[in-house]
Amino acid sequence: MKTKLPLLFAALMLLGAWTQESTDIKKADWIIGTWENKTPKGSLYETWRKINDHEYRGKSYILQGKDTVVFETIQLVQEGPNLFYIPTVKDQNNNQPVHFIAKTSSATQLIFENRQHDFPQVITYTKTGTDALTAEISGTKNGQERRQSFPMKRIK
């Protein structure tokens, strides 16, 4: 019995760690769908879909006539206990992905941070209603604090 107890304890610890891995990304289910931000210059869209239990993919785009112009693709990836927001923005960062790590992941807010990035250093999504959210980018640019908000409504 003495030898089985440590094995049982170790198995329970591993099971607990394994189930913890996917906890953060599941809290982000509310982001799945198509979101619209209407501006005087036109509409900005962001679409999110679930790939599997460890990855969601998004894209930001605008419609120009009948053309969809994608300017950012995003991965939301659970890697062990860490949740990453990984955007690839057209014509920025040599078209390479940038990793932001989750600082907050809840049923109403996602906050990602990368203090080494030029701008933004913080990306926040806040659920403001059943079919509403605000995406926000913030940080320091040219020595000044900046913040830009994008209120969005779910359209699908």
Image (cartoon, rainbow, N blue to C red):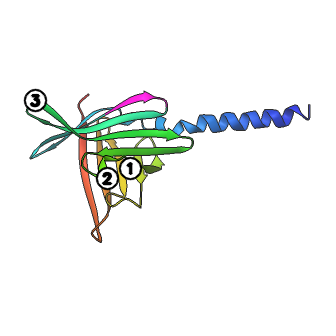
Q: Quadrant of the C terminus?
A: top left
Q: Secondary structure at mark 1?
A: loop
The residue beneath circle 1 is 98
Q: Secondary structure at mark 2?
A: helix
Q: Residue at x 49, y 30 (%)?
A: 53
Cα distance between the residues tagged 1 and 2: 8 Å
Query: Is residue 50 located in the magenta-colored stretch of the structure?
Result: yes
Under mark 2, the amino acid is: Asn
Of the residues under marks 2 and 3, which one precedes in the sequence?
Answer: 3
Q: Where does the image place residue 67, in percent across and percent down from the top left?
A: 13, 32
Q: Residue at x 27, y 69 (%)?
A: 142
Report the side of 39 relative to 91 (left or right): left
The residue beneath circle 3 is 66
Under mark 1, the amino acid is: Val
Q: Residue furthest right?
A: 1
Report the side of 57 relative to 15 (left or right): left
Cα distance between the residues tagged 2 and 3: 28 Å
The label shown at residue 93 is 2
Q: Where does the image place residue 132, in percent across and percent down from the top left?
A: 28, 39
Q: Where does the image place residue 38, in percent across and percent down from the top left?
A: 15, 42
Camera-side residue of 154 and 97: 97
Cα distance between the residues tagged 3 and 1: 30 Å
Camera-side residue of 134 and 11: 11
Of the residues under marks 1 and 2, which one precedes in the sequence?
Answer: 2
Asked if the residue at tag 2 contacts the one at tag 1, i.e. Cβ–Cβ closer than 8 Å, the answer is: yes
Camera-side residue of 89 and 25: 89
Q: Which residues are magenta?
A: 48-53
